[in-house]
Amino acid sequence: MASPQPDTGSSVDRPHGRSVAEVAELLQSSEAGLAGADAARRLAEVGANELPTAPRTPAWRRFLSHFNDILIYILLGSAAIKAVMGDWLEFWVIVAVAIINAVIGFVQEGRAEKALAGIRGMLSREASVRRDGRWATIPAADLVPGDVVRIAPGDRVPADLRLSQAVQLRIDEAALTGESVPASKQTDAVDPDAGVGDRRSMAFSGTIVAAGQGRGIVTATGAGTEIGRIQELVQDAGTLRTPLAAQLDSFGKVLTVVILGLAAVMLLIGRYLHGLPFDELISAAIGFAVAAIPEGLPALVTITLAIGVQQMARRHAITRKLPAVETLGSVTTICSDKTGTLTKNEMTVRRLVTPVGRYDVIGLGYDPDGRIVDAGGRAASGPDLSALLAVSTLCNDAHLVETDGGWGLVGEPTEGALKVVARKGGASSEGMVRRGVVPFDSAHKFMATLHEAPDGARAILVKGAPDRILQRSLTQRGAAGAEPLDRASWERAVDELSAEGLRVLAAARKPTRAEDVSADDLVDLEFLGLWGIVDPPRPEAVEAIADCHAAGIRVKMITGDHAGTAVAIGREMGLVTPERSRVITGPELEDLSQDALARVVRDVDVYARTSPEHKIRIVRALQSHREVVAMTGDGVNDAPALTRADVGIAMGIKGTEATKEAAEIVLADDNFATIRSAVREGRRIYDNLRKSVVFLLPTNGAQSLVVLAAVVFGFTLPLSPVQVLWVNMVTAITLSLALAYEPAEPGIMTRPPRAAGGSIISRRELGFVLAVSLLIGGVTLAAFGWVRQTGADLDVARTVAVTVLAFGQLGFLLNCRFLTRSSLTPAVLRGNRVVWWSAAALLALQLLYTYVPLLNALSDSRPLAAEHWGLALAAGVLIFAAVEALKLGLRRVTLNANA
């Protein structure tokens, strides 16, 4: 490896692959540390050991962004024309509608993004550093490359360190690499191309020391650290527009072209065919535009999504960003982290092997409620098992703690698993006194304790790597006592357990009379057996994955664990099958170009030994196929991919703060099965949103057709612009929101995800909307004309027209509850009580509109006689029946087309 020139002002390239002496030389440092003046100079050059703060979008700009909608532009343009013409009442009404929509969107948007702040919160605040030949505690922000730092259990590593000393040092890197077990550290250099999880000679900023002592040279600070690089990935990952936003934007552009085109045609006909005055035509055109624009649509979408947020919260899915509610319903692929998401993140002993037999362990996680059974499923016991379980509980420094929410662990996960299996087997440490200990060390890979029984007998108990224990063993504990060690048989057993994805540890013992114990005493041991340990899959996650597959959603496991473990867990989860057995590891992924990865990404469901960059590449490769991707995770290493995914899903209990703030959805119970429920809820929300849009559009369509017909045929406008806005807002606020509470359609999780792109409503539904618009508009014109023929005042006739439109929409609401089946059923009256509350609210508002003098003066409405109310009610019933006939015809056409 070529040695670059010393550069004390920056980090060292691949320090994990260099010797300690070489790193010290490159950074012009030594074990004595830096001089204070040198450190100050370097700090001035490289800057503080802090992550840079990303600029925040000002609140005023975020508020104004809610006006950035083409339909709102037309609405504001109409208001401007009204201001020029001096119609201030109508001007303020239109402006108020636009402002209300913006306020609702701004408030419901929730908290701003804090992903970078969450990552910054992971950094250590103080560090023990050697300066001027003395140890001192300084702010971690003052560390510079070349500083010598020491770390101890419980410390958060303050910067990236090339370790120069490592005494039984183990560091919890789960948040950075996804590894479920603390990583043992060493001082020897590793392969320069090793991934983050395999860089045993490094301690990384933001990780936590689980055990042992260490000392190292700072190789990178601030943005140059691994965690700083992840922040840069978060910034560069970018976000995508949600499918709903794209659909609404497409719909709005098409609607704008139609509205402006028809308004121009109306102006030309009114001016040159009927010779109408210009100011009257402008007022009519504005009335038409206001009638045609579904100004209640933004509020409808926002409030419907907000209702969905509340529904999802009851299912333990907390939504931080409104559009994610609907996007989750259109997901086609879920990329999930393994540790803590698909698995429990609680190491569990699954198999026991002794010279006498093999045993299975029932029960998952740290809950000691469980049992040990033999091959026949019977409760197991015997001297061989008792001896193995004694080592489990005595040669162990972990403790189980019962809490309100279940069982927790103080200590290392692997030792916790051994403590739990000892409890399940009835083993106890009562009366046993520890007289000595040989702590675990990554060099010799075992731990030993010296224990004294109440009768004074002493024994050395050992646990550790099977190969190391076998090397030191002479005999094994058979059914009749000690017997010669069958090393070949034990090596086969280790291979079999490893093939199941289990982490294998071995146990041994040796009677002694010594007062203490050392590594030199660990010879001629009696081999007791093996433990097969795993971070087990969540049972509910296995079922949830099967449900996702039935719903047409692929699930991909992306983990930092080794390929063997990933394959074994994937097989149990139903992700690895004979047809889909390929696994791609991080190094293999490095060798693939982005195009090559895109060609295979949909055929591979398990990725192992991955880094944060790999996760982003996988997400982007999937998105290149127009897949809608959800990414789950709990470590800071997941934050960039969560930001890039269409929906980022973080774990609420075990997830880091950075991950939660990068995500759109946080699972309060850390359960993959909750994602299935959230997807179901997302699909229900989209269905209801589509129903609401189909319901809302005929209101605008009918009103705009009424205004258009009046100009084209040259008769008096049946509605004024203020009355148009009244009908739009009243129906949007009352009736259309009722559909947001509709229960899920039958078979919602057995149909495939909806196709990306396209309009929020199909061509068939658009034709349906036009037909209903003509129907409601025609009935409204007929009612207006009939009332005028009776000699009633124009304002009375217009009030009747407004009431007919309102009652017609009420009838149409019942039609929309079941768009694909008949509403002529008692079920239309059940299942959604909000429908009736909305109907009552509509009637109350319409009574106020009709009889309150202030509203009469503002909107030119007038009190109605009983026959006028009867006419409006009959119109509503007629519209309901006619729409049902139209739905029946469409169903028959569909059946014939599919026959």
Image: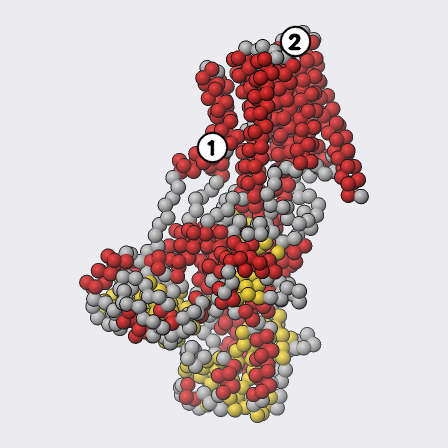
Neighbourhood count class around disc 1 (C-alpha, 10 Å): few under 14, some 14–19, many 20 upward: some
For label 1, the SS is helix
Q: Amino acid at mark 2?
A: Ala
Residue 882, disc: none
Give the residue at x 23% y 67%: 34
For label 2, the SS is loop
Is 754 or 438 nearer to us in this picture? Answer: 754
Residue identified by numbered label 2: 792
Give the residue at x 38% y 76%: 188
Residue 559: x percent and y percent?
Answer: 52, 63
Residue 870: x percent and y percent?
Answer: 71, 18
Picture quadrant where residue 742 is located: top right
Q: Earlier in the sequence, mark 1 or mark 2?
A: 1
Q: Can residue 772 be seen in this snapshot?
A: yes
Give the residue at x 65% y 38%: 762
Whether 576 is drawn above or below 80: the answer is below
Residue 83: x percent and y percent?
Answer: 45, 18
Give the residue at x 39% y 58%: 229
Whether 723 is drawn above or below 544: the answer is above
Q: Residue furthest left?
A: 37
Q: CA distance from mark 1 to mark 2?
A: 41 Å
Q: Can residue 430 be seen in this snapshot?
A: no
Picture quadrant where residue 784 is located: top right
Residue identified by numbered label 1: 67
Q: Amino acid at mark 1?
A: Phe
Nearer the camera: disc 1 or disc 2: 1
